Image (tube, rainbow, N blue to C red):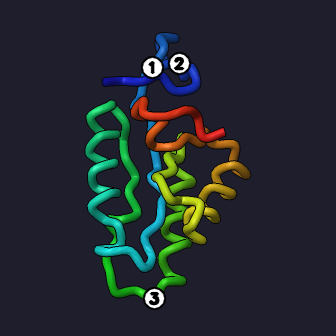
């Protein structure tokens, strides 16, 4: 599924479409398996909806905690949308990602809203 992005035009003046890039944010630290199964399920669902998914839960384990956020913010910078998983409000890292996305004027949505299970995040 192709989704239009910001009305880009090709060399021939035709409207180009590209897939929207979405970054998944949510709680990981201190949760069983670092919440990776929840991230994986969300990533699969979002891919099936036509998104290109940037999933921080696929980063390797074993690095010091402070090394992850710069990588995550670099991933988020490339995204069009940030998708907030349930429980993100309790995660210091997800709160940073949320604030950075708002600062960058990115679209912000809750996962359950995006898949049609609840009202909008804001």
- Element marked by disc 2: strand
Q: Which residue is drawn at 64% across and 65% down?
A: 96
84 is higher (above) or lower (below) than 89: above
Which mark sits nearer the N-terminus, 2 or 3? 2
Q: In which quarter of the image is the C terminus?
A: top right
Q: Residue at x 62, y 63 (%)?
A: 95
Residue 14 in the image: x percent, y percent? 47, 11
Q: Name the residue under label 3.
A: 64
Q: Residue 78 carries which label?
A: none
Q: In which quarter of the image is the N terminus?
A: top left
- Element marked by disc 1: strand
- Element marked by disc 3: loop
Q: Residue 16 carries which label?
A: 1
The residues bearing labels 3 and 1 have C-alpha atoms spaced at a distance of 41 Å
Considering depth in this image, is 108 or 7 the residue closer to the camera?
108
Q: Residue at x 42, y 29 (%)?
A: 116
Residue 111 in the image: x percent, y percent? 45, 43
Q: In this view, does 116 lie to the left or right of 50?
A: right
102 is higher (above) or lower (below) than 80: below
Q: Name the residue under label 2.
A: 9
Q: Residue at x 68, y 57 (%)?
A: 99
Q: Is residue 46 left or right of residue 105?
A: left
Q: Residues within 10 Å of mark 3 (few under 14, many from 20)?
A: few
Q: How crowded is mark 1: few (under 14 residues within 10 Å), some or many (20 or more)?
A: some
Residue placed furthest toward the right: 103
Instruction: Say if mark 1 contacts mark 2, CB within 8 Å.
Output: yes
Residue 83 in the image: x percent, y percent? 49, 46
Instruction: Say if mark 2 contacts mark 3, CB within 8 Å.
Output: no
Numbered disc in front, either 2 or 3: 3
Which mark sits nearer the N-terminus, 3 or 1? 1
76 is higher (above) or lower (below) than 73: above
């Amino acid at each position: 599924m192709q989704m239009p992005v910001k009305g880009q035009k090709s060399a021939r003046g035709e409207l180009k479409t590209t897939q929207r890039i979405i970054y998944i944010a949510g709680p990981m630290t201190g949760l069983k398996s670092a919440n990776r199964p929840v991230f994986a399920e969300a990533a699969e669902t979002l891919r099936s909806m036509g998104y290109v998914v940037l999933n921080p839960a696929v980063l390797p384990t074993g690095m010091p905690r402070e090394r992850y956020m710069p990588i995550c913010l670099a991933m988020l910078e490339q995204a069009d949308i940030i998708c907030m998983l349930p429980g993100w409000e309790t995660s210091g890292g997800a709160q940073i990602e949320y604030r950075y996305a708002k600062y960058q004027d990115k679209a912000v949505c809750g996962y359950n809203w995006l898949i049609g299970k609840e009202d909008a995040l804001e």
